Image: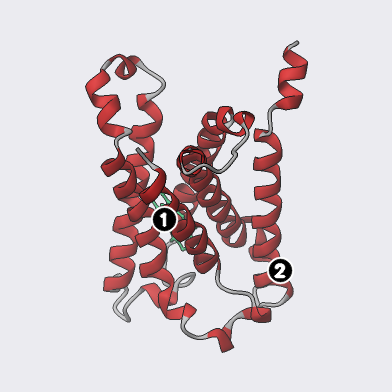
Amino acid sequence: MEEIEKSNNPAWAIIGWTLIFSMGYAILRYHIFGPVPWKDFPFFILNKGISLSAFILLTFNFTFGPLKNLGVPVPNSWLRSRRFIGIVGFILVFIHAVMSFMLFNPANYAKFFEENGTMTLIAGLSMLTGVLAFIFLWLYNISFNSEIRKDKDLISFITSRQVLLSAMFLGGAHLIIMGYKGWLNPGGWHGGLPPISLVATTFFVVGYIINIFGRE
Ligand code: HEM
């Protein structure tokens, strides 16, 4: 019986295809069409693939319910898979945050630093929104897994429309602030492929609109 349930659970397929798409895209854009050497795959490029996977999975997690509310026939098995997809998305964001802290220096991200080694305004704002989005996701995650769950007021606050829309907005702002300059220069896109920040922002915009209209 449990085996049947497992085989009917689409979460693994959704997570697997998201990982394949995100990693494949990062490899294609930066190694195959771009100039990044393969020695940078295990950390610098992997971090990009992980952050894109996390973003897509968390967007799915927040958007399946509102999509159903709008009358789109989202299968019940997809709705049931949201919790697992959300946990995996959070773990991937956690890995992304740790890897980014280790990578974040002028040698890896020249565009984010002034000549004197301090962060640019854009980098500061992008990191601030990333950290705030991460803290929200962390609170959201623990609120379903502990004693806090019994605090109905806190749960209804964390899962309220305003708070979820604000949290999604912070995630989107993290990407838009960091990436918009590169988006405006399609001639510089490796192999004509849009930057990962733009791919993730496309998921964000679609997910955000569905949430605005479909979240109760
Ligand atoms: C402590 C929190 C965070 C820190 C320090 C952080 C740091 C960074 C850095 C340094 C980059 C540039 C990566 C690169 O271009 O190689 C980045 C990109 C990105 N981050 Fe975050 N981030 C945080 C939170 C988040 C959260 C919460 C999400 C998702 C909800 C997220 C999703 C992304 C995505 C999709 C990219 C685009 C990667 C690219 O354009 O290559 N990040 N982040």
Q: Is label 1 within 8 A of ligand 1 (CB to nearest ligand atom)?
A: no
Vertically, is 65 above or below 118? above
Q: Residue furthest top?
A: 1
Image quarter of residue 16: top right
Side of 97 where 2 appears, left or right: right
The residue that appears at 41% across and 54% down in the rendered structure is: 208
Q: What is the crowding at mark 2: few (fewer than 14 residues within 10 Å), some, or many (at least 20)? A: some
Viewer-closest of 13 and 162: 162
Residue 67 drawn at (x, y percent):
50, 44
Rendered image quadrant of residue 193: bottom right
Q: CA distance from mark 1 to mark 2?
A: 29 Å
| Position of residue 65 measured from the top left corner of the image (x, y, whole percent) | 48, 37
In the picture, the quarter occupied by the C terminus is top left
Please tell me which of labels 1 and 2 falls first in the chain.
2
- Find the residue positioned furthest to the left: 153
Q: Position of residue 59 (x, y in %)?
A: 49, 47
Mark 1 residue type:
Ile
Q: Residue at x 67, y 63 (%)?
A: 25
Between residue 212 and residue 155, name the one nearer to us. Answer: 212
Observer able to see residue 95:
no
55 w.r.t. 104: above or below: above
Q: Which mark is residue 209?
A: 1
In depth, the one of 183 and 4 nearer the eye is 4
Q: Could you say whether the residue bearing mark 2 is in a helix, strand or loop? A: helix
| Disc 1, SS | helix
Quarter of the rendering containing residue 162: top left
Q: Which residue is mark 2?
A: 28
Ligand 1 positioned in quadrant: bottom left
Query: What is the number of the mark on residue 187?
Result: none
Mark closer to the observer (1, 2): 1
Residue type pointed to by label 2: Leu
